[in-house]
Image: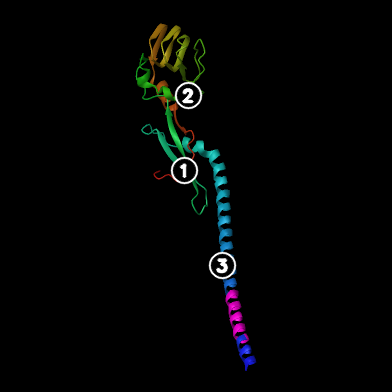
Amino acid sequence: MESKINIGRNLEKGVITLSLLIFLSGLLTLALLFDDDLLSFFRAQQMQRQNYSERALLLQKMMQQEKQRLCSDLPLNKKIAFRQVSTTLAGAEDMLQYSVWCRYAAIFKKTPLKPNNEGLLEQFVRSDDKADFKNEFASSSNPLVPTKEPQLYWFDKTQSEREVNGDIAAVIIAEGDLKLHGKGTITGTVITGGELTLDGVTIAYSKKVVTPLVQQYNKWQLAEKSWSDFKPQNE
């Protein structure tokens, strides 16, 4: 009788053990499936990040080559000082974009309409933008001599005197006083921040000289430290 009881107990323990093994096996199977899905998810995320980085690097190289062009291609508009423009990597599903800020620079606030603009520098000239065009000004030789094309000459306060030899087609800007002496004519206009003295030199206003030079010395250019990796809200 006692042996039968022991056999019954052993069978009961066996069934419990078998049930526990089946339960643990199910949990293990679920865990493996979950781990496989989790690994697949992380692999997909890694591939997506890698793809994003590759496209971001490609776009950055494109921007290094084209960011100045993005600004120079903007239509000239003197009513605003800054404008944000962007570019998008072609074919990017998530529209990966970078943007830059462009700054408007110009020498003239408005077009001079008379030959002698003595002491009117601040009225006509944006002196703060001088650095943006310093490499574009005509070489200020002494004496000034005729050239094939009209020129813009900029004299700082240390360049207070120039000899004129012949008929000069030019716009002359002087930060301070300026004395023009010699024999000749300035065809265009002269703008000074101080006193203008003429000795043997005359000034004849020419719209054909002044207007093209005013239009030439204005541009959009890349603003410093303006790189952004987001899409402009209003463009």
The CA span between labels 3 and 2 is: 64 Å
Mark 1 near mark 3, Cβ–Cβ under 8 Å? Answer: no
Where are the magenta residues, as a range? 10-25
Mark 2: few/some/many CA within 10 Å (<14, 14-19, 20+): few
Query: Which image quadrant is residue 205 in?
Result: top left
Quarter of the picture containing the C terminus is top left
Query: Is residue 22 part of the magenta span, yes or no?
Result: yes
Name the residue tied to disc 3. 34
Does any portion of residue 112 appear in the rendered image?
Answer: no
Q: Quadrant of the N terminus?
A: bottom right
Quick one: label 2 or label 1, which is nearer the N terminus? 1
Question: Which residue shows up at 40% across the image and 9% down it?
Answer: 202
Q: Is residue 207 left or right of residue 18?
A: left
Q: How far across and how far down the image is residue 92, in percent?
A: 52, 52
Give the distance between the C-alpha atoms of the residues marked 1 and 3, in whole angstroms: 42 Å
Q: Could you classify mark 3 by the number of other residues whose Cα lies within 10 Å: few (under 14), some (14-19), or many (20 or more)? A: few
Which amino acid type corresponds to the residue marked 3 in the rendered image? Phe
Which circle's residue, 1 or 3, is located before the other in the chain? 3
